[in-house]
Amino acid sequence: MALLMAASLSWAQGGVQIRRNQVGCYPDQEKVVVIEGVNPSGKVKVTTPDGRVVRPKVTRKSVSPWSHKTRYVVDLGSLTATGDYRVTVGKESCLLHVADQPYHDIATASLRLFYLIRSGVAIEKGGAYNRPVGHADTHVLVHPSAASALRPAGTVISSPLGWYDAGDYNKYVVNSAFSIGLMFAAYEQLPDYFARLNTDIPESGNQTPDLLDEVMFNLQWLMTMQDPYDGGVYHKLTTPNFEGFIMPADCRQPRFVVQKSVTATLDFAAVMADAARLFEPFGKDYPGFPAQAAAMAERAYQWATEHPDAYYVQERLKNPAVTTGTYGDGHAADEFFWAASALYKLTGRQQYLDDAIRTQPRHFTTPTWGNVASLGAFEWLGGDSTHALRQVMQDQLLSYCDAMVSGVSTSLFHSPYGNKPSDFGWGCLGEHCCCAAMALLYADHLTGTAKYRPYALQNVDYLLGRNATGYCYVTGFGDKSPMHPHHRISEADGIEKPFPGMLVGGPNPGQQDKNDMTTPYPSDYPDESYADVMQSYASNEIAINWNASLVAFLCWIDALRP
């Protein structure tokens, strides 16, 4: 990585820019760069690791429908030897790294990030990022919206551990469960890979894969969010207002659990059902957990069936009012489908099958925290069920993937992602780039044809630098990556570099934060509407759901190595 940094492209010179994957490629991976600022025909050359000079061809022009910038797609040909290739256009040059395991370090960092954002414990294996305990959460108040006869308002409960959700310090059941669901889906496809993956966390070295150990740290918090008296699940653990940009140990606001919601309860039921299955082989490290998780999942599902309209409405919360992240959702059919599918996979009970059939989606959609139907689909696609619903889910997935890849030959940056305005927005890099590529990898696995894998790798290229801004959107990697994410610890810890392995939200033409920024967005174009400044929560925040999509995607890509 140091070599790539030292030989970085001079981005400011002359307007000629070479957009490429800044992290690396597999030897057998397609290798394409996109050049802006000059027609490179006859001007671009590639110097191979052994000193030979290759003259690649320009395959086509690409004209942005928004900025009307003309770019040129250049196929570097069959460069299969490992090493560093220098791509040169006039005075501009950069390196393209080819290696047998180009994605291993970035995949590992994306998962290790969850250790660095643990709540309620001292971080002691973070190197320069070590910090003392913050938010022990052993004195959490029951908010009036969450009060019940056996837990009246003001009751003190203990709800420690878990992950900080995003750039803030709160913990949200909906997003935590969704993040776990994405990583569980990848784990089920790659158990042998994750058995080998070492992220150097305190639990490394036990008999449980590090991914499951990390997830368990959050599951232990989630378990405290279920009301033991009725089975409902509190929507979130939060301060009334967002904390300032200070370190966790310096925070002083009281923390509350707030209203139980049907969506949080169903998401909880789904991940607990999956956890009961997936932790079954690891009883030595977590004795008794599978049975406990299964019981909690079924109890939560029962509460949800009895309270199907218990949607979270933050505006109704008083004494105190709450202004932190909402994760509100007024439609629960997708949550019922995911939870019923997970519980059927765990128990085989007819009730859950009937509910899954009743709430099944009509088409495949990219997984988001607000629409988790695809996580329900992954329950069916990730196992060996012969039920007709599995075939329905597979047909929907393949239809979605075929539509996604159909326009690559005329795409802006030679990738399925990034070609229409709806590709961009809040958290787009996680939801529309990583999660869509994850669907492609499912399709690749289900068909056994390797048809979809090259398209998933094209989304890797886009994410890691072959895009309109020239950013590798993962902190700590590439030669142009975010340095000022909207992330309280990275801003307050006095360390120049942010935590490595964080995926930022990405270009967001909505620019909901532009009035809060001292530095304006550099562009209003959909794919360039990104600002690497701390104030940009709309384009430059980090969040566990986006990083979970990065983990699922990049670990799956890393597992493809020979």
Image: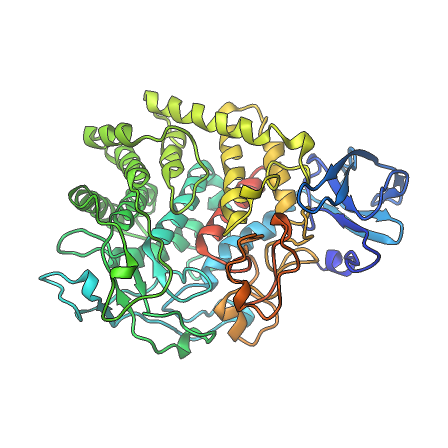
Q: Residue 548: x, y in percent?
A: 46, 50
Q: Residue at x 74, y 45 (%)?
A: 69
Report whether 527 appears left or right of 127: right
Q: Residue at x 84, y 43 (%)?
A: 48
Q: Residue 403: x, y in percent?
A: 54, 28
Q: Is residue 264 above or below residue 237?
A: above
- Quarter of the image that includes the C terminus: top right
Q: Residue 334: x, y in percent?
A: 33, 38
Check the image and name the residue furthest to the left: 149
Report whether 184 appears left or right of 261: right
Q: Nearer the viewer, residue 96 or 536?
A: 536
Q: Is residue 386 visible?
A: no
- Quarter of the image that includes the N terminus: bottom right
Q: Residue at x 60, y 52 (%)?
A: 105
Q: Residue at x 73, y 39 (%)?
A: 63
Q: Nearer the viewer, residue 312 or 154?
A: 312
Q: Residue 202: x, y in percent?
A: 43, 62
Q: Nearer the viewer, residue 503 or 448?
A: 503
Q: Quadrant of residue 44?
A: top right
Q: Is residue 204 visible?
A: yes
